[in-house]
Amino acid sequence: MAVSKAAPAKEAAPAKTGNSDIIAQFEGICMRVASAIPILLFKTWVSAYFHPVETLEKEKANISAMRVVKSAGLLGLIIGVLVMIIIVISTLMQGQATQIIAAIIAGIIAIALYIVIVILGMFVMSLIYFVFAKLFGGKGSYMPQTVGLTFVGCGTSLIRLPLTILGMVPCVGFVFSLISLPIAIYGFYSEYRVIKNVHGLSRNRAIATLLVPWIILGVLLVIAVLVMGAAMMAMFATMAKSGALSS
């Protein structure tokens, strides 16, 4: 009598962790909001924030400096418009309605400045990372890295935008600023994934590529503050000595 063989048991799929469930739910909310806004770049930014490697792979055929300019320029426009609104509202709240035209002009100038600053900032910051990636043995190219980092940076800024605005509310603003901190940290993690994937770096080298420039900048700032402090103390000591001699 033939004995039927039991089918091999399927390997149980690994259970999702609580953190991954939270991130998936948060991604769903962000993507629904981005999809409701008729600006296609918003969906690309949010996708890059949560899935930087996969999004960059989809954008491989469209990688160019113009993609960086469009995304960074749009982010600069959004920031500039918010600054303009703040300037106008502040002017009205101070009872300076006669200065409204000047406030609008200042806001327009702010918009233009933010567009230029954000575009240049994306290229320059990516160039700094690129130099360090090469020093650590990176094999990738500048433009794919810049496009990936720009999408992630814009996605991070877009997702944090409501919390940034609420962070300006007196007394309770710091609460929203604290809430936005994990969003910024996850954005840093997505930037790490871009660097690691584009340049084929190990985990430690990719992390070093992102951290070392900021460490160097921090050290330089501390040195600058110490030098300025020493110079001011020397100046005050000289002035005190001169005053004592004159008396």
Image: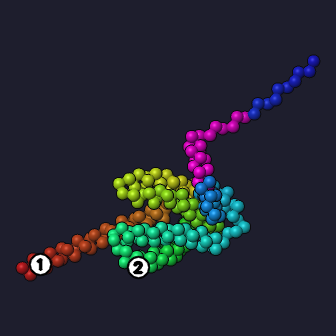
Residue to which mark 1 is pinned: 243
Q: CA distance from mark 1 to mark 2?
A: 46 Å
Residue to which mark 2 is pinned: 102
Taking the image as shown, residue 142 lies to the left or right of residue 230, namely right
Q: Amino acid at mark 2?
A: Ala
Taking the image as shown, residue 84 lies to the left or right of residue 135, namely left
**Residue 192 visible in the current orientation:** no
Considering only vertical position in the picture, is 236 above or below 170? below
Q: Residue at x 56, y 45 (%)?
A: 22
Picture quadrant where residue 6 is located: top right
Q: Amino acid at mark 1?
A: Gly
Q: Secondary structure at mark 2?
A: helix
Q: Residue at x 59, y 51 (%)?
A: 29
The spot of residue 238 in percent (x, y) is: 18, 77
Nearer-N-terminus badge (1/2):
2
Secondary structure mostly seen in magenta is helix
| 177 inside magenta stretch | no
The spot of residue 2 in percent (x, y) is: 92, 21
Region in magenta: 11-31
The spot of residue 169 in percent (x, y) is: 39, 58
| 22 inside magenta stretch | yes
Taking the image as shown, residue 62 lies to the left or right of residue 167, namely right
**Residue 237 visible in the current orientation:** yes
Picture quadrant where residue 59 is located: bottom right
Q: Residue at x 45, y 79 (%)?
A: 105
Taking the image as shown, residue 132 lies to the left or right of residue 55, namely left
User: Residue 82 has which mark?
Assistant: none
Q: Residue furthest left?
A: 247
The spot of residue 183 in percent (x, y) is: 51, 54
